[in-house]
Image (spheres, helix red, strand yellow):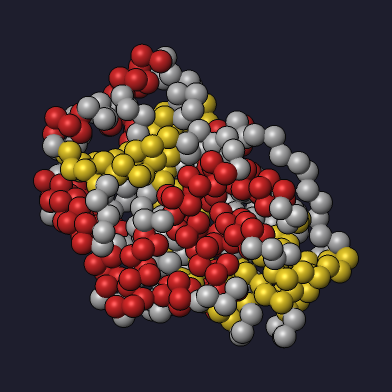
Amino acid sequence: MTQFVPAQSYYAASANPAPERPALEGLHETDVCIVGGGYTGLSTALFLAEAGFNVIVLEAMTVGFGASGRNGGQIVNSYSRDLDSIEKQTSAPHLKHLAEMAFEGAQIIRQRVKAYDIQCDLKDGGVFAAITAKQLKHLESQQQLWRRFGYDQLELLDTQQIKEVVNTDRYVGGALDHTGGHIHPLNLALGEAAAFEQLGGKIFEHSIVTSFNQGETAEVLTAKGIVKAKFVVIAGNAYLGNLLPQLAAKSMPCGTQVIATEPLDEALAQSLIPKDHCIEDCNYLLDYFRLSGDKRMLYGGGVIYGARDPADIENIIRPKMLKTFPQLANVKIEYTWTGNFLLTLSRLPQMGRIGHNIYYSQGCSGHGVTFTHVAGKALAMAIQGQAERFDAFASLPHYPFPGGRSFRIPFTAMGAAYYTLRDKLGI
C-alpha cells in the first residue's frame, strides 16, 4: 500500500503560494484524464492543453507531492543508462529519436520557465565529479559518446579546474554540462500546474484513483467521482502503488534522502561552489548537492531499496556532506526529508500502452527531472496521433525483477553492494 506522508522538506517550507484544489466528486467527461500531479502528468497535461485538448489531472495528495517536489533539483541530461547502452537494445530509427530526446528535457524546462514566468530559482551548469581516475576516464568516453550524437556542451575539467567549481579535495577531475542546471523542484511543479490551469485545465487534489474501466471511453474511478475520457495517462511513478500490478512487477520504489543546512554566509557559500553549479559524483550510489536560492547547502545521497523511511536521515547524509565539505562541520541542519523514485531493472524508463487508449510512463531511475518533461511531450504527441517518439521509448525492453516482487529488494541491494565496493576500490 502506498504511504502518503507529507515531506517536511525545505521545498515545502519555501514553496510559492498555491490554491487549494477540490477533490473529485461526481461525473466528469474530458478528452484526457491524467493520473498523477507530478512532472510527468503536468508536462503531458500542459502540452495537451496548449494543443487545445480538455484535460483533467487527478492527484492523490497535492501537486508535486511525490518525487517532483522532493528531488535534488538537478537538471541532468540523458538517461540513467546512457545512449551506448540504449544503442544495443533498439533499432536505428528509434535510437535517432531517443538521442534527440536525451538532451531536450533541459530545453523544455527552460522554455516553460520563460514562457510562464515560473519562479523556481533556475541556475545554469551541472557538474559530474570524478573521485577516481577510472571515473574521469569514463567522463572522457561520455563526452565522446554525446558528441557522436550531436551534443557538444560537455566540457572536461582537470584537477585544478574542478576545484574552481567545487571547493573540495575529493575530486580528481570532472565534466561541466553547460545545459545542465538546477531548480527549486516543487516551485517548478507548482508553476507548471498554474500554467496548465491558465489554459483551462482542471486539477483535482486528494483524489486517489481506486480503479479503471477500460473501453472505447475509459473510466477512472475515485472514492467520490468518475472521469470518463477518450484517453488516460498513468503518471504515478513511485507513488502509484499496486493500482496496476502489471506495471508494479517491472519496477521498484526506492527512497533517497536529502538534508538542507541553515542559510550560509554569502562568503562561505561562494567559497564552496563559486559558480553556483549543481554537482553529482560518479559513484554507483552517488552523492548530489547544490546551493539553494537562499544559499543553503542541499545535500543528498543514499538509496533505500523498497522505499522505507530511515529513522535518522541526518545521521546518514551529514557524514557524506562533511566528507566533501569539512568546512560545514559547525553548520546546523534545518531540514531532512526522504522521497521515492522508481527504479527499473534495466535503469531505463518504461513507456507503453494498455489496451488502445491507456498510456503510461514510469521508471525514471533517478533521471526524472529531465526525462519526465520529455515523456510529457512524447505522450502528448502520441495522443495527437504522432507516435514516433512514444514508439521509440516503447521499443525498449521491459524486464521484471528476478524472483518477482518478493525478491526484488534483496537482489537489487546485493547488486548495489557489489558496485559500491567497486567504487571504493576504484575498479
Quarter in which the C terminus is drawn: bottom left
Residue at horizontal 42 percent and vertical 35 percent from the top: 123
User: Splitting the image into 4 quarters, where does residue 275 fall?
Assistant: top left
Q: Residue 407: image x %, image y %?
A: 42, 72
Any part of residue 35 in sight: no
Q: Residue 403: image x %, image y %?
A: 41, 78
Residue at horizontal 46 percent and vertical 30 percent from the top: 292
Foreground of the two, 393 or 367 = 393
Foreground of the two, 2 or 290 = 290
Residue at horizontal 76 percent and vertical 41 percent from the top: 19
Residue at horizontal 31 percent and vertical 42 percent from the top: 178
Quarter in which the N terminus is drawn: bottom right
Compared with 378, 373 (above or below) is above
Q: Residue 270: image x %, image y %?
A: 34, 20
Foreground of the two, 39 or 60 = 39
User: Splitting the image into 4 quarters, where does residue 99 fall?
Assistant: bottom left
**Viewed as shown, does residue 34 lie left or right of 165?**
right
Compared with 354, 280 (above or below) is above
**Viewed as shown, does residue 121 lie left or right of 239?**
left
Compared with 295, 257 (above or below) is below
- Count of marks overlaid on the render: 0
Any part of residue 28 in sight: yes
Q: Residue 349: image x %, image y %?
A: 43, 67
